[in-house]
Amino acid sequence: MELFVCFVPTKLGFGLLGWRKSIELFILPQKTQEDIFVHLDRWEVKKRDIREKHPPFPGIIENIQAYFEGECPSFSYPLALERFPPFTRKVLEAVAQIPYGKTLTYGDIARKIALPRATRAVGRAIGRNPFPLFIPCHRVTGKLNLGGFSGYGLRYKIFLLSLELSRNSFHRNSPL
């Protein structure tokens, strides 16, 4: 299935935004464009199926770039959530509500969706998030540690949290 994409240059490297009618995925910046293709495999997107195009979402490239400059842009763009099962969609919608510079635990998210015992299932659902930044899964931590960051590694999660927390140092709600 064809996917429209654009490479987004940032100070960290190139991100990749993919969409059809709404955003299908966002790959966090990598050092080179070729490094991005490794991440496309995770989402079962083949290089031959992508077509470069300018995104139809006003200001999206500038907002992504602003985020990596330490600003707090709005990421209110249409996301392809309909492809997920109801539980995963509910989890991702709850994560999308976490404000910039704040964190919640997997347990907090489980309680928010009225399934307090579903902490591990929440973690698995968050691991399926193809929209980092738009649905800020890096803002979800474990009760006693930072938790994981599927596909990107803990160092990237620490970087994103540090970027946000340094800007909001007076408003932390997490003992990071």
Image (cartoon, grey):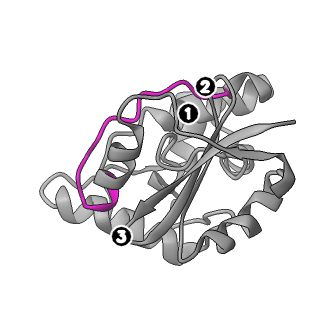
Please report whichever mark, 2 or 3, sits nearer to the chain's N-terminal start.
3
Type of the residue with mark 3: Lys
Please report whichever mark, 3 or 1, sits nearer to the chain's N-terminal start.
3
| Label 2 sits on residue | 114
Q: Which residues are magenta?
A: 67-80
- Say which residue appears at 68% left-offset and 43% top-offset: 122
Residue 161 screen position, x and y as percent = 37, 63
- Residue 111 image label: 1
Q: CA distance from mark 2 to mark 3?
A: 39 Å
- Residue 11 image label: 3
Q: Secondary structure at mark 3?
A: loop
Residue 172 among magenta residues: no
Left or right relative to 49: residue 39: left
**Mark 3 or 1: the one toward you:** 3
Residue 7 visible within the image: yes
Q: CA distance from mark 3 to mark 1?
A: 37 Å
* Callout 1–callout 2 Cβ contact below 8 Å: yes
Note whether 148 is above or below 127 in the view shown. below
Check the image and name the residue furthest to the left. Answer: 170
Residue 42 screen position, x and y as percent = 80, 59
- Say which residue appears at 35% left-offset and 70% top-offset: 11
